[in-house]
Image: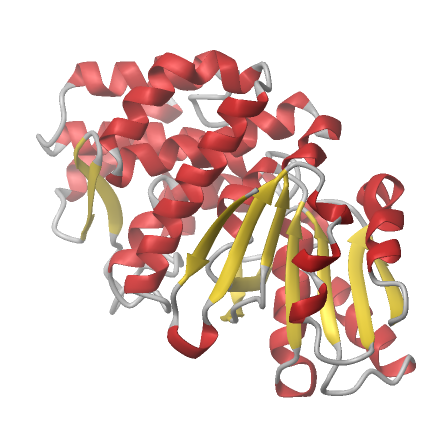
Amino acid sequence: MLELKVDLAERSYPIFIGTGLLSESDCFLPWIKGRQVAIVTNATVAAHYLQLIQMVLAGHDVTIITLPDGEQYKNLTTLNQIFDQLLRQRHGRQTTLVALGGGVIGDMAGFAAACYQRGVDFIQIPTTLLAQVDSSVGGKTGVNHTLGKNMIGAFYQPNVVVIDTATLDTLADRELAAGLAEVIKYGLIGDPSFYQWLLTNIERLTQRDPEAIACAIHRSCQNKARIVEADETESGQRALLNFGHTFGHAIETHTGYGSWLHGEAVAVGMVMAADLSRREGFIANSDVNQLVDLLVRVNLPVTPPANIGPDDFARLMAVDKKTLNGQLRVVLLKSIGSAMICDTFNQQNLRDCFESFCS
């Protein structure tokens, strides 16, 4: 088992990474204060892993909250189902919520924990690669709105993150590829040696080599923990983690949540952000082509859906959370392995980028 720590003073917590951790009580019980536990999951994940967690939590008063599966359900209506069950089962302030699932479950359970009785403990058990390397770490929680993705939420840290790599055995190839988009992001924005490793080892990851998978998860979590420790509430450099996301969120909002996986939209967003970086003179055309080739090797999309146009991108990106005083800010690459938050880019270059990808 590998262990990392997200160092946030009194809100610090460990990340455990290994195989078979869902059966290890030492990964869970020290971080549960009271007898009441609510496991938030969906039917797909529950069929594989709920029984294991229930066995570990034997002796606790456990409530099972099963939500519908899919990004299209990540909204306030579904969130209220969590509150309904917590209240019906009379969960108090000493309860612990356990998020058992992918990013949608983790985001909603975390947001519910932040809000219920003004804050209760929660544990992250991410079961998808994307959640393991990104959404389960760092305390971003929330839900989508029809006008924008993740626009309603809170920063709220978990007590512990337990990453059992065996859960990836039941993950669909498309979901695995979506997670690899976030893995590639870490190399692009701040870890050039990791990016070079990915260029050489990407097939090992797509073929689910256990050693390569564990290495990629560990390195990704290291990168995210380092950034979160420096900027917990995204007042500065944490926004670098959104490389490709401003474009990608526009795609998700336009197509309807759930049509494109988050990682698929981010993959296209990273190519568009890299293209804008090239137009601004920061990186070479060969760098963009290399990224495109890497994403194609993962079987990820590199162009947006045909029904989104330049005006759609402009409208949807205008409500992005990184917009400051009405000015759109985007994350650009200064070089491969180095990113920056930019609001001084040439607006015509952005428009040309839209036109190029939407033609």
> Is residue 27 shown above or below 83?
above
Residue 220 in picture, x, y percent from top left:
42, 40
Picture coordinates of residue 321 (x, y %)? 38, 61
Q: Is residue 47 visible?
A: yes
Task: Give the residue displayed 56% in from the left and 50% down from the top.
Answer: 16
Which of the image's four quarters has the C terminus? top left
Q: How is the image coloured?
A: secondary structure
Residue 239 horizontal side relative to residue 316, left or right: left
Q: Would you identify the image quadrant in which residue 310 lies?
A: top left
- In the rendered image, residue 284, in percent from the top left (x then y), is placed at 13, 20
Q: Is residue 271 above or below residue 240?
A: above
Rendering coords of residue 201 (x, y %): 42, 15
Residue lying at 42% horizontally and 21% vertically, measured from the top left:
302
**Toward which corner of the image does residue 190 lie, by quadrant?**
top left
Q: Nearer the viewer, residue 337 or 51?
A: 51
Nearer to the camera, 112 or 309:
112
Q: How many marks?
A: 0
Task: Determine the residue positioned at 36% across, 13% down.
Answer: 200
Where does the N terminus fall, quadrant-wise?
top right
Which residue is found at the position 66% from the left and 69% from the top? 30
Q: Foreground: 102 or 153?
A: 102
Q: Is residue 306 visible?
A: no
338 on left or right of 28: left
User: Residue 283, located in which quarter of the rendered image?
Assistant: top left
